[in-house]
Image (spheres, rainbow, N blue to C red):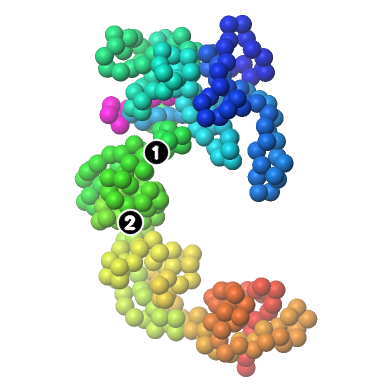
Amino acid sequence: MNFELVTMPGELWKSIPGFGDEIRVSNFGRIWSLERAIPSFTDPRKMIREHMVRQRLQSYFDAEKRKHFLLLIVVVQHGGLKHGFSVNRLVYESFGNTDGYVEEGIRIGYRDGDNLNNRADNLYLVNGESEEELVSEPKWVSAHVRPQQGALWNGRLSRPIVKYHPDGAVLEEYEHANEAARHNGVSEDAVSEAAAGNIALLNRMVFRYFKHPYNPRTDDYRFGKPVVQYNVEGKKLSAFRTIREAAEFFGLEPMGICRCAHGITKIYHGYIWRLLGEPYEGEYGKMNCTIEQYNMQGKLVARYPGATEAALRMRGNWIEILEAAQGHLKIYEGYAWRFAD
């Protein structure tokens, strides 16, 4: 790829619709970004220099053929946002025999089979009717050859998602989170969180990214450990065979209980959770004991009837104040904290 800011012999340039004259595409498959202002919150006078946009190879998943193929993509900035495009579509829509738009779902093929060659005379539509479809298609690759990074949807990169029954049976496959959200009546963010494993069940079903298939025997190992529930004073309330069982009993998210049980969070839904064999001894039970606040010179600044009241006055975290009062933290919010004698 030639990144010099010069026009090569026989090269033609056209502006990309919707981007004014600031970003151009050539019949040789190059993208030229002109100098322009891209103001931001931190620098309202920020400028971007004129340059040839670098392209990167992306693995695209064809849900119909259940295969991956590679293509070049570019990401450009305009109007304070980043926009992603496949280079072959930009070139074909600008220089191919179209009215400037190729419908979603229609793939663009390569006459010489080289999916790095995005010259206009090398591209054609693969529409299922043309004899040209018999010409060499883009190079297919196995999923394990190159990590699957996702498709392009609505100008953004996305990742295929699979919907499973909790017993492991595959129910549906989607090209991106938005499609899964529309078919299941949930938000796109919820689907993404579930596919990442942060939500165990969504509408009583399991969602996973295509690259990370769901296995009911091993996928929920984090939620299969015994867990014990305590109140903040350290009294044992109940025990469960698994984190998932506790979550289902109380209608909570297993990930929230899991994070608390591993010490990532101090408390979850008003209770302390610990893995079996790691008892909680009421470290946070002194939340209603009188707490004193000292400045860095050792002078008493204030006295509070409990950690909760101190947190409200300081607009802070009562757990962190308790940690400081117990000596686990030396300073919190610029003050030293101690329990009153």
Q: Residue furthest right?
A: 297
Note whether 208 is above or below 83 in the view shown: below
Q: Is residue 8 magenta?
A: no
> In percent of the image, x 70 and y 44: which residue is there?
44
Magenta stretch bounds: 63-73
Q: Is residue 64 magenta?
A: yes
Q: Is residue 142 visible?
A: no
Q: Amino acid at mark 2?
A: Ala
> In percent of the image, x 42 and y 76: which residue is there?
270
Q: Earlier in the sequence, mark 1 or mark 2?
A: 1
Note whether 55 is above or below 269 in the view shown: above
Dividing the image into 4 quarters, which one contains the C terminus? bottom right
> In percent of the image, x 66 and y 49: which residue is there?
41
Q: Residue furthest top?
A: 9
Q: Secondary structure at mark 1?
A: loop
Q: Quadrant of residue 138?
A: top left
Mark 1, residue position: 159
Q: Residues within 10 Å of mark 2 (few under 14, many from 20)?
A: many
155 vs 235, nearest the viewer: 155
Q: Quadrant of residue 43?
A: top right
Q: Secondary structure at mark 2?
A: loop
